[in-house]
Image (cartoon, rainbow, N blue to C red):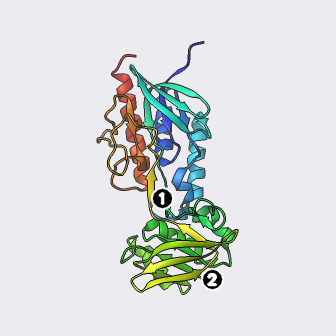
Amino acid sequence: MAQDIFDLVILGAGPAGITAAVYAARKGLKFRMVTLDIGGQAGWSGDIENYTGYQFLTGPELVAKFQEHMDHFGIDVSMPEKVVGFKKEQKLIKITTDKDEYLAKTVIIATGKRSRKLGLDNEDQLRNRGVTYCATCDGPLFKGKVVAVIGGGNSALDAALQLVGICPKVYLINISDKLTGDKVMIDKLEKAANVEIINQAKVSKIYADNFVNAIEIITSQGSSKILLSGIFVEIGLVPNSEFASIVNKNSQQEIIIDQENKTNVKGIFAAGDVTNVIEKQIIIACGEGSKAALSAFRYLSTNNF
């Protein structure tokens, strides 16, 4: 039996992928979404105050609205599936996942990014035992406990702001000499009585029995130990682009695209945080997803298969 050939396969269902899917549905394309989850990093966000049309909503609330939009169009989603193979076969692209294979005339890579790790020896073993990468997901589990947020950008500030209302003490450990997130978020944290900001500090060790009980940090004054129960790691993100070896990437392993979201391989487009677009914001990812879908439609309209 001949394998189905899709006009488009969208990899990832974060803001970029979901927006691309809505545009593809409106264009009447035969397409499929392949993803590990719905929402991506947007689902990890706490308070969102800069998404046009909504003065305030949480990440999970925004993802629920995305899901409603997808349901309205009856969009087919293969989930959870992880891409393990990706290659061009003449004019088609073959995508192999841990569960299936797909052939497509065009592909939009919108696989986003994942949390960067501290790189400490026992970090992986202590995940979900005091080490976490998502304050929205896991913050409530640490109610009444002392915690540390590692990082100094918007993600770290957002995590700290989620925790200040439920934890008696929140340490913000920042490797740089100052916080780099939005001023409004910094101002809120600096006014919080239960937040201690420690700049120019690096976590060198995690102490634990079965669960985290302390960390060691190194500053210009030397090393010191902080007793706590939770560590929220917010030190940046890594692109989920390992499978896409046939497209060009920059030194950060972000997929290089042009203004039409084209990669160096015909028929393969990319959008959102997995690309080299400078700013990583939900609303920008949505815009990039729409551009990628329109470019894919234009490519399908002007090529014979």
Instruction: Kindly identify the residue that appears in the image at 37 percent across and 28 percent down.
Output: 267
Q: Secondary structure at mark 1?
A: loop
* Residue 192, visible in the rendered structure: yes
- Residue highlighted by disc 1: 116
Q: Of the residues shown, which amino acid type is indicated by label 1?
A: Arg
Observer-nearest of 97 and 266: 97
Estimate the spatial distance between the alpha carbons at disc 1 and disc 2, rounded to whole Å: 27 Å
User: Tag 1: Cα neighbours inside 10 Å, few (<14), some, or many (≥20)?
Assistant: some
- From what the image shows, is residue 135 above or below residue 267? below
Where does the image place residue 110, in percent across and percent down from the top left? 46, 42
Where does the image place residue 299, in percent across and percent down from the top left? 35, 27
Where does the image place residue 211, in percent across and percent down from the top left? 68, 69
Where does the image place residue 282, in percent across and percent down from the top left? 45, 54
Query: Which mark, residue 168?
Result: 2
Instruction: Kindly identify the residue that appears in the image at 44 percent across and 67 percent down.
Output: 154
Q: Earlier in the sequence, mark 1 or mark 2?
A: 1
Residue farthest to the right, as pictured: 210
Residue farthest to the left, as pictured: 258
- From what the image shows, is residue 135 above or below residue 32? below
Instruction: Kindly identify the residue that appears in the image at 59 percent across and 59 percent down.
Output: 124
Name the image quarter holding the N terminus. Answer: top right
Asked if the residue under mark 2 is in contact with the one under mark 1, i.e. CB atoms within 8 Å, the reply is no
- From what the image shows, is residue 96 above or below residue 260? above
Query: Which mark, residue 9?
Result: none
